[in-house]
Amino acid sequence: MGSVLRAARTAAGVSLAGMAERTNYSKPYLGQLETGKREVLPHHIAAYEHALGVDIERLAYVAATPRRADSSSLASLATILSSTRRLEDAVGARGVLDTVRGFDRLSRSLAHHARSPLAGSAACLASEISQYRGWLELASGDRAAGERCLNSAITLARNADAPDRLVHGLSFKAYAALEARRVGDAAALTEEALRVRGVHPLIRVYDRYQLARVHAATGETHAAQRALVVADKAAEAAAGEEPPDAGYWYTEGLWGLHRGRVLWLLGQHQGARREVRSGLAAMPQEHRDATWAAKWVKAARGDGEVPH
């Protein structure tokens, strides 16, 4: 129960000191509750629920009895996941990784035990969380753990017949392959992602830009330029689409960063920096301030290479 309290608090972006102010319990006392050194009682749960606006008792119940999960419990977990994604923007991947590891274990248990008609929804959510954990593991330096999580996300998405989740998993696995300089693997994964039907238009745009990056990384200049034109047209066609929550950063500004990445690989360094500067200017302020954007801001200033 203590770990559930901690997960809910960190997902909401509230420090122990902040929680002490909201609940009138001391910081050391709350720390003992969250680490299991003190028994968590109903009035503690009520205090956390009031302070955070989350149904913690429901999450704890589901964690203990996954066979009794319902749509409400899946929605509660999805809500905390959404908050955790945005918290990561402020504190970085390592700041939320332990929490998401716990969510990953819980969601896989739900997917394993859920029965129809919840089975597909549980597997879909588990795929999303595994994919997110994979990204966090990669960003924190554990490539092997990251790829294991992405493989799990892809398998869960296939089981759930969830095209968005499947393509997201394939796309991030291709990203991991590019970061590891396995361009051939990245090309195969990106092509596979592009063959999946029924995908959100903005997720499709990401894969179009990634294909241009793959071609540029292999020195296929003309193919990269053609792919970039196709990606730009796809981005223009999808401009009015609402981003999915699992890709809320998919904005026109982000596509500018991706154009800059491809141009840099093609040797067009001045044009690449211009695209990055334009992309950052078009992004919401909270995205520019996110930890993942720091390398792009640095490149826009001319302090380093455009990430490629």
Image: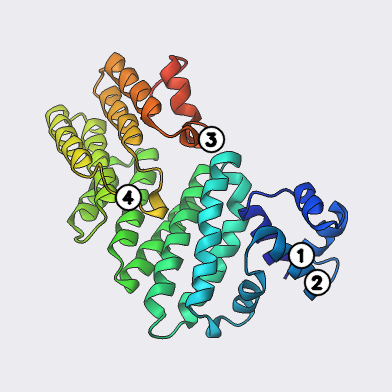
What is the C-alpha distance between the residues marked 3 and 2? 36 Å
| Label 2 – label 4 distance at C-alpha | 40 Å
Q: Is residue 129 above or below residue 305?
A: below
The residue at which mark 4 appears reads as 242
How busy is the neighbourhood of tag 3: few (under 14 within 10 Å), some, or many (20 plus)? Answer: some
Residue wearing tag 2: 43
Q: Looking at the image, is mark 3 or mark 2 earlier in the sequence?
A: 2
- On screen, residue 81 above or below 89: below
Q: Which is more toward the observer, 102 or 34?
A: 34
Q: Residue 211 bears which disc, if any?
A: none
Q: Amino acid at mark 1?
A: Ala
Q: Mark 2 is on which residue type?
A: His
Could one spot residue 40 in this view of the protein? no
Q: Quadrant of residue 219?
A: top left
**Marks 3,2: beta carbons within 8 A:** no
Q: Horizontal placement of 183 versus 89: left or right? A: left
CB atoms of marks 2 and 4 within 8 Å: no
The Cα atoms of the two marked residues, 3 and 4, are separated by 23 Å
- Going from N to C along the chain, the mark reached first, 3 or 1, is 1
Residue at numbered disc 1: 47
Q: Position of residue 125 (x, y in %)?
A: 44, 67
Residue nearest the observer in this picture, 180 or 127: 127
Q: Are marks 3 and 1 in contact (CB under 8 Å)?
A: no
Q: Closer to the camera: disc 3 or disc 2?
A: 2
Residue 200, horizontal then vertical, whole percent: 27, 55
Residue occupying the point 43% across, 34% down: 284
**Residue beneath disc 3:** 291
Nearer-the-camera pick, 89 or 260: 89
